[in-house]
Image (cartoon, rainbow, N blue to C red):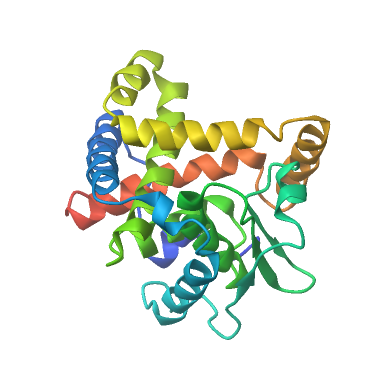
Amino acid sequence: MNYYRIPIVQNIGLSTDSLKLADYLVVLETCLDSTNILRSQINPKQWEHQDEKIKREMIALVQSDTTFQSFLSTTLVGAKGPLNSHWVSYFGVSGYFNPFTHEAHVNTAMPVFSSPFTYVHELAHQQGVGFEDEANFIAYVRLKNHPELFYRYSSYLQTTSYMLQELRGIDVELFATYKKRLSQLVVADLKEEATFWNNYTGWTNKVFGIFYNGYLKHNNQKEGMARYDRMTRLVVAYELKLKGCL
């Protein structure tokens, strides 16, 4: 991974400096609506125990995707599960990239609707992306128009969740208003995900969080773990650019 490479905003021509709350809300509304609609069309339970299929198809997607080919490596693209997914869950880890073996790992114990997004995120690291927000953004872009609705849902669910978290830090009342627009099926999925991680919360999770936060800051990401949430700025700028607004 390269923590000092040219930022993705320069590579694909995005402008994040002049974004306004109104811009953010327009994109959030689109993400919310897409998340609700996609969830009504799929059944995540049908994808449980399909990790090998998901992994295989996410690797194929990354290998064939041309959106970011001008600055991402495609020579080594592959992923696998950790030796023990339940063990890594105690560290609050959904996925990780091992810089020593150059392997991308995804926690296969977590709720299945999180897997596609996590696979593509970790594979972006494998392709050379160091920043967490950029890896999240790449996962969003690569999956948002996937022909398989389940994969598309994974992208929108994670992105909507990040956007709502960001909004909560800006305006609590607005956050509550937009959160109410989530369908009951989506809310149930988010609760399932939260319950899963809460079951593994403990001292190991906290210690690892402190360690990883410091690791990110040491590697040119001064925001630490909050860097993940910054993907929302990239998503908003990207969507506005597609609409010809930026």
Query: From where the camera sits, is residue 2 visible?
Result: no
From the top left corner, tell me how far across and down residue 66 is, in percent: 37, 78
Q: Quadrant of residue 96?
A: bottom right
Query: From where the camera sits, is residue 85 visible?
Result: yes
From the top left corner, tell me how far across and down residue 77 is, in percent: 57, 78
- For the N terminus, give its image quadrant: bottom right
Judged from this view, the residue extending furthest toward the bottom is 75
Answer left or right for 165 relative to 206: left
Answer left or right for 215 relative to 72: right
Name the residue nearer the viewer: 236 or 173: 173
- Residue 222 higher or lower than 154, as above or below: above
Q: At x 46% / y 80%, what residue is drawn?
A: 63
From the top left corner, tell me how far across and down residue 82 is, in percent: 72, 62
Judged from this view, the residue extending furthest toward the top is 173
Q: At x 67% / y 41%, what residue is drawn?
A: 224
Q: At x 77% / y 42%, what residue is drawn?
A: 214
Answer left or right for 36 relative to 129: left
Judged from this view, the residue extending furthest toward the left is 244
Name the residue nearer the viewer: 68 or 63: 63
From the top left corner, tell me how far across and down residue 227 is, in percent: 58, 43
Name the residue nearer the viewer: 231 or 51: 51
Name the residue nearer the viewer: 185 or 2: 185
Count of residue discs: 0
